[in-house]
Structures are given as structure tokens and as C-alpha cells.
Amino acid sequence: MRQINPKNDIVISAIGFNSPYGTEIDEYLNNWGDQPLSSSIIEDHDPQKFLKPKGQRFLNKATLIYCNAAFQSIHNRDLGKYIHNNPERIGLYDGTELSNLEDCFIFDLTAKNQGPDRVSPMKAPSTIANAAASQMAIQTGIKGPNFSVCAGMAGSLQALDIAYLHLKQGMIDYGVTASTEVRNSYQKAIQKTQRNKSPELGISMILERQESLEKDNRKPLARITMLHSETYTHDAIPFETYLYEMLFPVIKQYNTDTIIVSGGTSTIHTNIFENLFKEKNFPVTVLYPENKFGDLDNAGGMIGVAYAISVFNGKNSHRTDKKNILVLSADPSGTVIYTIIEKNSI
Amino acid sequence: MKRVVITGMGVVSPLACEKDDFWKKILNGDTGVSDLTKLDSSNYKGVTRAAEVHLEKEYHNINVIEHFRPYGKAVTYAAAAVDMGLKDAGLENKFTQKNNYGIILGTTNGNQDIVERIVDEWDLGMELEELNPEANETLNRFRPVELSAGIAKYYHLGGPNMVIPTACAAGNYAIGTAYSMIQEGRSPLIIAGGADPFTRSCYTVFYRLGAMSKNDCKPFDQDRTGMIVGEGAAVLILEELEHALARGARIYGEIKGYGLACDAYDPTAPDPEGSGATLSMSNALVSGNIDRKNITYVSAHGTGTKANDAHEIKAMSNVFGEGINTLYVNGIKSMLGHCMGAASALEAVSSVLSLYHQQIPKNRNTERIDESFNINFQIQPSKEIEHHVEHVLSNSFAFGGNICSVIFSKYETN
């Protein structure tokens, strides 16, 4: 049995969430997947009024949703005072991919069709994919690492991994990690191949060491035991076989019976993937939250982690008596990342 | 913690598209800045200068060029830099065995040229139009992950791949992240750097911010008038020391540490007090366990804008105290322009070659330190540091206050 090491163990201590159906993630995961979507658009990006009103009109929607979700997790973990006293010891992380696509089009269309003098320089930051985490730093005064990362549909798990790495290396005490999905016509054009349309959403998680959580007499939502990323490059092997061969030893090592594929489900032939386990008589259940909630793209990985937490908490129809769940995201580019999420047993 | 060394480099720059030529021209004080050819400058009111790359004139691996032609320009630039970097490191051109070698690239504009290709090719107007299937297909290449994953697939790099879009600090972010991952044993070899294409949008951004010079980039000079938009790519082949030694690799230098920080001040302007830059440089020194007195020189972000250079000098003064008086500050954007996400990667190559060859680039166009700084520092290398290059601290700053400083050091066997 693995020993808990409070100085080294990285835990998830709080979640923030935003969707067209409210800001309660458990309610969202339990109630909304089975119903047809009436709207996929977040009408109120900041129902709690966390954001400073000044200048909001220059921010794109991904930034607004990111900031709200990040503020929620900071609020839920009660980090306001720590941020004030130690702004350099907190990092902001964004798993992003197409958050700036619409801004890139509008900016260039204006420059080309109306001339460069008609372009608003205030809109310039939104054309770069670091806009959301940067704006959150301005809103909160967080001066630690400000890190945006793109890994396609593996983006949010990749952002979690960077925060995890920074915590492991002692660069930060808390990692505020978030990812968003927004909907617009340009994104639709890219996402034409996807099977299920998901609503807009934002999700955020606070990562920290077990030690800091214990100091505040709090319990973790779950523990991140490990993260690993790879790239599928050898087309001679089917993608599903590659995934199976990569995951099989990990599943055995961590004694799990549950895989959650979230972020890039549409890139995997799920029957072929599951049959590989069945052929070996290996008892594993594969869950696909995106089949219920729509393709979650770069935010999928973090939603998958939240889904794992809902299983551990008994707020999910799936049950397991194992301590670990594997969450996997995979991008059509071959970018793959997985994490082992451990149930809080304290 | 594992040691991380540099065993190869690849360069695609406005000065040269080959590492040794690049270094020769840097030492000569040549310039890659000239009149703009990739965009009609008539709407830009006298702003006509750029630092452009003309890859196909200088780089002749037709397989790489043709394979990446449908991708954004940054992908082609980066793929060419990786090709040259792998050869420089004495590695296979394409790996045939399963491996967990990685690639991490930083960028500002990523594949923005794909958007512009669609806007131009299908003559899009301001009204939102349904894109035709061909345009949709092209738009798929916009995804930033194509930059690292496309190259990983081509060269069969089976380890981690990601793109870090932290604008003009992105190259250093990529190098720092690769360093951390190798330190932690995630991979024995990661290709890290940055890439950016020339785009209409990028030129327009800096034009509208009033940040561009109408003549030359003169970092820290009393008469500086702004920056020059550039483009390019550069990569470092970073290896875990034992992995490099086991294959008898040439070692150019070592990474000793890096620091990340954020100004948390403004989306485009730096904090005049240099708070983020001070923190980033301090973090780098602490992580590398290096005394500030042992920094041979600083490879500055040095864009040549009033605001950037003033805040960078303020931050250096905070970090080095009175030591700044004798500190040499080198800014090579005077020769390369500001190559955006590639900028700090190109500066990394210059820093590492400086350590390897024990030669120091001189400043071009910087003649008189801005009196408003009220701070003195050295604008040309002294005889004391020439041939005694131990540690170079390389700064990079970006929109959003994203900041990363990396320390490159001379490789010592012990």
C-alpha cells in the first residue's frame, strides 16, 4: 500500500465550474448529461461578480469564463489572504487551444478590409492564447508562474501536469489550473468532425501539497498520483492498440478497474479499445463522459478528473471499490496524456 | 536532480538559417533588418522595417519543406530548425526506434498565418461567412498543437509534446519546462525552443501600439524609437547529461536554472517597477544556486521600446544592486528584430554559443545609455569577461506580463 507523503503528495483541494446550467459541477455531472441541451451558451459568465467590471468589454469570452472558474476555486479554497501575502508562490495555468480563434479572425479581417488604423489595440492581447491566465493575474495580483499550454484535446491535463511539476519542484505552493470551451462559428468550422457538440464551460482546480491542506484542517478531493504524456507516432500500430499497450501495465501497477476517457473520445474506436482488454480477460470498465456531455475538447481532461472524483464520492452511477482511477485524454494529432487519480482515504 | 546539457542547436532567423552562419553574423554585428517585403506597408504610415526570414533561399531539405507546406509557416520554420538541430547533435534524422524523446515549442502568433491564408485566399469580408470545406480543411492547421505534434510525428519523437503560447517569453518557457521535465526523469532528451511566422496581425498589433521603430532597433539607447517585427525559429537539443555522455555527444553548455514570474500589471505594458522581471531573475539565480556576482553578462529582452528597456534596467538594478555598474548587457534584437516566440530561443542559441566559443556578441546600434535610467551598466563587453564566459542570464518578457529568465552555463565535467 502506498504511503502518504504530505510534503510530496499533490492533491486537488477545490473545484470551480461554470456552464449554461450553473456553477455546481456535481449537479451538472449528475443531472444534465441525459437531457437534451436547450442552450450551449453561457449567458452570465460571472454570476458571483468576481471580476472587476472595468475593461471587461475588451476581454474575450474564454478569458471571462476562465477568470470566473479560477475565482470560484480560489474562493472555495479560501486562498484570498494567501494570494495577498504571497503572490509569487501561486501559479496560474490554462489548458487552451482555440480560445483566441475568433479574435484572430476579427483582428485580421479588420486590418485587411478596413485598414490597420481601424484595429483596436485593446483587442490585441486577446489574439494570443495566453490572454486568460494573464488577465487572471491582473485581476488577482498573482505573480507566480503564468502558464498557458496547448496540447489539443489533451490541453487541460497538460496544464494540470505543469502545475504538478511546479509543485513537485517547489516553485509554487498552489497551482490554480483552469480550462475553458467556448462556441463560435470559427470553432464550429474546425470541430465539424466531432460527433457531439458540448456546451460552453469552464473548470478550475486548485492543486497543492497535502501538507498545506492539512495545515488548514481540510481534506483533499483526490490525490494526483502521477501524470504521463506521450506522442503516438508509429502509424503501423492502430491507435487503440498503442493506447492499450501504453495503459495495460499502468492499470496493473495502480490496481484500477476504471478508465475515464475524456478529451478526444471521438479519436478512439471505443469498441476496439475495450475489446483489447476483454481479449485478455482483464476486468476494466471504460467510461466516456463525452458521450453524455458532448465533446469537451481541451477541457475534457479536467472534466474527466472531476468525473473520477464524483465516482469516489458516490455521486455517480458507476461504482468502484478500487482506490485509483485512470483518466485519459487523446488528441487526433497523437498527443496523449493520462493521470492516476487516487481516492482521498484520509 | 539530473543535469541538463545542450548538445545541438538549429536556427531559422532573419540573419541566417544555419547555426554557424548565424553566430558569425552575430559576432560581426550584421543585421537582418531591412525593408518589409511580406506585406504592403503603404497603410502603415512610414513604418516599413521588418526582420524577415527567407527560408527556401538558405535551407534546401526539400523533404521537410514539402511535408510541412500545408502547415503554418511557424511549423515549417520549427521543423527546419529541428532538422538542423538533430544533425548538429549527431542524432538520427528520423528516429526509428520507440523512444520517449519530447518536443516543446513556444510561440506568440502560432498558426495565425493560416487565418490570414484563409482570409486572403477566399477573400473574406467583415460579415461572418460560412467557410467552404476547403477553407475548413485549411483551418484545421490553425490548432497550435500542430506545431509540436506535427513535428513529433515527422521525426518520430514519442515523448511529451506541447506548445506554450506565452507570447514573446515562450521560447524560454519551453526551454525551462523541458529542463524541469528532464530533471525529473520524464524524458532523457527534449527539443525545446520557439517559432513564429511573420503575420499581418502581428505587424498591425505593434503598429497600433506605437511600438515600432521607423529605422533601427537600438536597445537601451538614449535615442531608441522602438522595436522591429521579426520572425523565425530556434531549438536547443536538451539532454540528460548521462544520456549525452553515453552516446559521446558534443556538449555546448548546461542549463543551471530558470525562473518564472508574472507582472500582474497590464495586458500589454510592463510594470515600470520591474516587479515580475526582478522576481524571475531572482528565481533563476536561486534555482541555479548561482551568486549574482558570477553572472558574466545578461542577454537582455531589450526590445528597444521606451517602456520595455526602462523596466528591464530597473529590474536588473533591483537584482544586481551596485553590481549593475560593471555588468555587460547584451541585446541582439538590434540585429534580429523581435522574432516573437522565437526571440528568446534565438537568444538562447547566442548565449550557448557564447559559452561554447568563449566569445561575446557586441551591441549594435547602442551608443549612449538612456540618461533617464539613472543607472550605468556596460554596453560593450570588457576584456575581463571576454574568454571568461561562465554564466549567461537570458531574459524574456511578454504581453500579459509573462516572464521567464534562464541561466545558461559553461559545461564543467564536475
Image (cartoon, coloured by chain):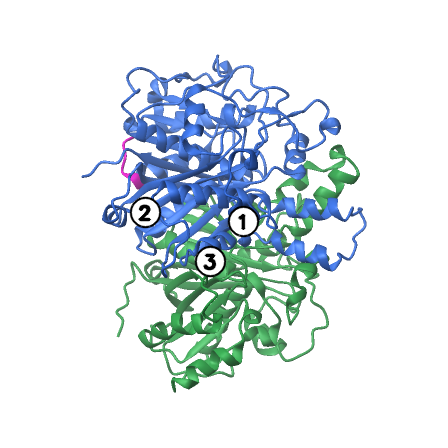
Q: CA distance from mark 1 to mark 3?
A: 15 Å
Q: What is the quadrant of residue B225 in the picture?
A: top right
Q: Which mark is residue A133?
A: 1
Chain B colour? Answer: blue
Q: Position of residue B292 (x, y in %)?
A: 30, 29
- Residue B48 lies in the magenta stretch: no
Q: Which callout, 1 or 2, points to the residue nearer the camera?
A: 2
Residue B55, numbered label: none
The amino acid at mark 3 is: Gln
Q: Which residue is mark 3?
A: A158
Q: CA distance from mark 1 to mark 2?
A: 30 Å
Q: Residue flagged by tag 2: what amino acid is it?
A: Glu
Q: Which chain can be seen in green?
A: A
Which labelled disc corresponds to residue B239? 2
Q: Which residues are magenta?
A: B287-291
Expressed as whole percent of the image width and height from the top left, the position of residue A222 reads: 40, 69
Residue neighbourhood size for the residue with mark 2, other residues' Cα within 10 Å, grouped as few (<14), some (14–19), many (≥20) = many
**Disc 3, SS:** helix
Judge left or right: residue B283 versus residue A79.
left
**Quarter of the rendering containing residue A283:** bottom left
Residue A324 to residue A121: above or below: below
Q: CA distance from mark 2 to mark 3?
A: 21 Å
Does the segment drawn in magenta span residue B288? Answer: yes
Q: Quadrant of residue B255?
A: top left
Using the image, determine if residue B346 lies above or below residue A3. above
Are discs 2 and 3 located on one and the same chain? Answer: no
